[in-house]
Amino acid sequence: MAEPHTQVRWQSRRAFILAVTGAAVGLGNIWRFPYITGENGGSAFLLQYVLFILVLGLPVMMAEIMIGRSGRAGPLAALTTLAKANGASTNWRWLAVFGGLTLFLILSFYAVVSGWSLAYLGKSISGDFVGVSAAEAGGQFNGFLQDLPLMLGCHIAFLLMTMVVVARGVSAGLERLNNWLMPLLYLLLLLLAGYAVTTPGFATALHWLFWPNPDALSWQVTLDAMGHAFFTLAVGACALMAYGAYMPEQQSLPRAAVAVAVLDVVVALLAGIAIFAVVFSHGMEPAAGPGLMFVTLPVAFAEVPGGTVWLSAFFVLLVLATWTSSINLAEPLVAMLVDKHWSRPLAAAVVGLSVWGLGLLAALSFSLLADWHPLAFMAVFEGKTLFDLLTSIPPDLFLPLGGLFIAWFAAKVLSFEQMAAALGSASIARYWRMTIVWLSIPLLLLILLVTLYRW
Ligand code: PHE
Ligand code: NA
């Protein structure tokens, strides 16, 4: 058995669930889920995404938390000590480094889109969207992408907000604030979805989202659904290992993981229903891309009384949600440098500046760098801007690849006693290992290999 690194435990079971929910619920649910669903033909994507949550996301999420819980340390130390203790190669530590790289790439576009949300908060408070029509909202978003001072300023502001918290190591306070406010965000989404029921496009939206549509199936849809299952649960980059390290002894890991996954899916579905009801009520284009949320929400709120206040409240809560998700993305990177004896403020500054630099190039993908296609030499990436590449390759390929190795480590390197201890029961451990070995790992291998082959 590895020497336990930490004796610290969260005070309650709720604390663990809330912390993992903070990492899970974010732009992935409210921004990425609707636009990816829209680009992939609705139900063809959605049904596979739910399936992948069940057979890949959830079991691998358990694997990731198990490793942290068994190692009682951050990703790098947990993987190293557990590998050593079980006679495996310490090269497993590279998995944590790969996870760090993935987090870095994700954070670089996440901060850009968070900056958009911040800008939209300001715009909605100043009443820019009062009585806006679908066409006007679309025009405003395209105009915003060309408004470099505002867009780039908000990108910087959001990164400062994130890195200051990480530099001072004070995320616990923010986490508590978030735990009070996130239920309000869910409530607002519920109200919005409830309002959607009364709109003319609601029935079409439901049909399009849930009624099987085999014509829309394609390999790209499957790949996107798998990637998004990992992205939305924050699984595959070793970020959840750190949470397992502080998990109270008596808490059930499987039950907590199921609770987070269910909540995450429900939040995404509410956002999807609300957004596609607007799309179909106003004859808009479901495949509008990354701007979908920013175009539909102002239109939705423009119709209801007191819309400006509601819309502003929505963006306040959304910015809070993306703030905690960004902190969760940045913290492991900074922690890795701190372990290498960097000071925390220096580590935060270096991470923040690098994330800013890459994000800046991504943010310009809609204006100055619209014709820059960095990986155009590969046929599959022809015509893709840096923003397109960053929002697809790390979530759709790197997270599943990391997840594959995380699953492998948890099922093949950990002893059965360690699995059973982390999962809380030997019979659950047997079921879990059977699922991972016979279902999750083969399916992940199959999808990744077919993808490579098709390239
Ligand atoms: N799960 C987060 C979301 O849905 C994004 C995320 C991915 C956060 C990976 C941390 C790690 O917005
Ligand atoms: Na999510």
Image: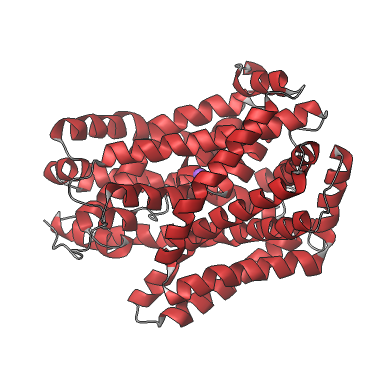
Q: In which quarter of the image is the C terminus?
A: top right
**The residue positioned farthest toward the front in the image shown:** 306
Front one among 353 and 411:
353
Tell whether 146 sits left or right of 333. Answer: right
Asked whether residue 446 appears in the rendered view, the answer is no
Establish if 232 lies above or below 158. Answer: above
Establish if 139 lies above or below 202. Answer: below
The percent coordinates of residue 131 (x first, y second) are 86, 43
Establish if 343 lies above or below 179. Answer: below
The percent coordinates of residue 17 (x first, y second) are 35, 47
The residue located at (84%, 60%) in the rendering is 146
Tell whether 296 sits left or right of 409. Answer: right
The residue located at (79%, 40%) in the rendering is 299
Front one among 115 and 238:
115
Establish if 150 lies above or below 437. Answer: below
Front one among 403 and 126:
126
Residue 127: quarter of image: bottom right
Q: Quadrant of the N terminus?
A: bottom left
Residue 254: quarter of image: top left
The percent coordinates of residue 198 (x first, y second) are 72, 23
The residue located at (53%, 37%) in the rendering is 267
The residue located at (28%, 47%) in the rendering is 13
The percent coordinates of residue 252 (x first, y second) are 24, 40
Front one among 15 and 87:
15
